Image: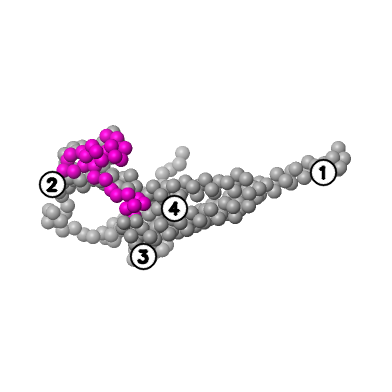
């Protein structure tokens, strides 16, 4: 085969390589753009989506797929609609934070499904909420007796909030008059063999203290799977398991 016959194959090969490179670069750009937008929307939207937020997220996901599937489409044709939806969501979030009435109009209001131990069947039908779903949610919350519930709300994001009667709540140390020590939250010092130096400093300890804690484990932090310390100085340490 002469060089003249190889030219078409080389052109096709280079074209395929170029297309793959364009898809790779577009994917990285779209991913970075969506990651930035979701970070700007805040953690509330990531953890609890209202109906309008779910619709916008679905539309953005569909729009983001278009420039990835069709490399002949200009990137701006995919970016501009995404940017428009993002701006709309930011505007709606800003307005609903200032207007309770607008928020109620767009997102609705919580529905009272249980009042004083009695299920409101009309609200159940209105929200298309099946009895099996209600019972499953109550089981997940560890509630056996519906009569022990004073109020149960179906929130606008679809989650069930349950308020038992005060007499059904577990007794706290304050109720029993027991004094407790505030231990704060445990800081992670070692995670999967990696020392988090900043947390060691924030906990008020130094390297010498850490070496004394690691002495039973040969002084080697890489042999530790997890080590934490709380405000009272209590240490929790889990060594790594031996791999077969």
- The quadrant of the rendering that contains the N terminus is top right
Q: Nearer the viewer, mark 4 or mark 3?
A: 3
Q: Earlier in the sequence, mark 3 or mark 2?
A: 2
| Residue to which mark 2 is pinned | 167
Q: Residues within 10 Å of mark 3 (few under 14, many from 20)?
A: few
| Residue to which mark 1 is pinned | 7
Which residue: 15% across, 46% down?
165
Q: Residues within 10 Å of mark 4 (few under 14, many from 20)?
A: some
| Residue to which mark 4 is pinned | 193
Q: Which residues are magenta?
A: 103-131
Q: Earlier in the sequence, mark 2 or mark 1?
A: 1
Which residue: 63% across, 52% down?
74
Q: Earlier in the sequence, mark 2 or mark 4?
A: 2
Q: Earlier in the sequence, mark 3 or mark 1?
A: 1
| Residue to which mark 3 is pinned | 202
How far is disc 4 from disc 1 in space, using C-alphas?
55 Å
Which residue: 49% across, 47% down?
59
How far is disc 4 from disc 3 in space, using C-alphas?
19 Å
Classify residue 183 as left or right of residue 31: left
Which residue: 15% across, 48% down?
166
Q: Secondary structure at mark 2?
A: helix
């Amino acid at each position: 085969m002469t060089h003249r016959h190889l030219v078409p194959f080389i052109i096709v090969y280079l074209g395929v390589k170029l297309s793959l490179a364009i898809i790779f670069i577009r994917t990285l750009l779209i991913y970075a753009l969506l990651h930035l937008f979701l970070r700007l929307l805040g953690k509330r939207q990531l953890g609890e989506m209202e109906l309008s937020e779910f619709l916008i997220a679905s539309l953005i996901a569909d729009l983001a797929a278009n420039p990835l599937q069709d490399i002949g489409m200009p990137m701006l044709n995919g970016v501009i609609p995404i940017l428009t939806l993002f701006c709309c969501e930011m505007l709606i979030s800003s307005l609903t934070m200032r207007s309770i009435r607008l928020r109620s109009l767009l997102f609705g209001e919580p529905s009272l499904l249980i009042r004083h131990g009695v299920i409101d069947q009309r609200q159940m039908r209105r929200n298309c909420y099946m009895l099996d779903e209600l019972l499953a949610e109550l089981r997940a919350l560890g509630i056996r007796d519906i009569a022990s519930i004073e109020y149960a709300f179906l929130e606008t994001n679809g989650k069930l909030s349950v308020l038992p009667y005060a007499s059904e709540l577990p007794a706290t140390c304050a109720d029993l008059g027991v004094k407790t020590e505030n231990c704060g939250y445990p800081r992670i010092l070692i995670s999967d063999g990696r020392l988090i130096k900043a947390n060691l400093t924030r906990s008020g300890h130094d390297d010498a203290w850490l070496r004394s804690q690691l002495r039973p484990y040969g002084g080697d932090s890489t042999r530790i799977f997890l080590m934490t310390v709380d405000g009272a100085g209590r240490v929790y340490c889990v060594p790594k398991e031996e791999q077969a």
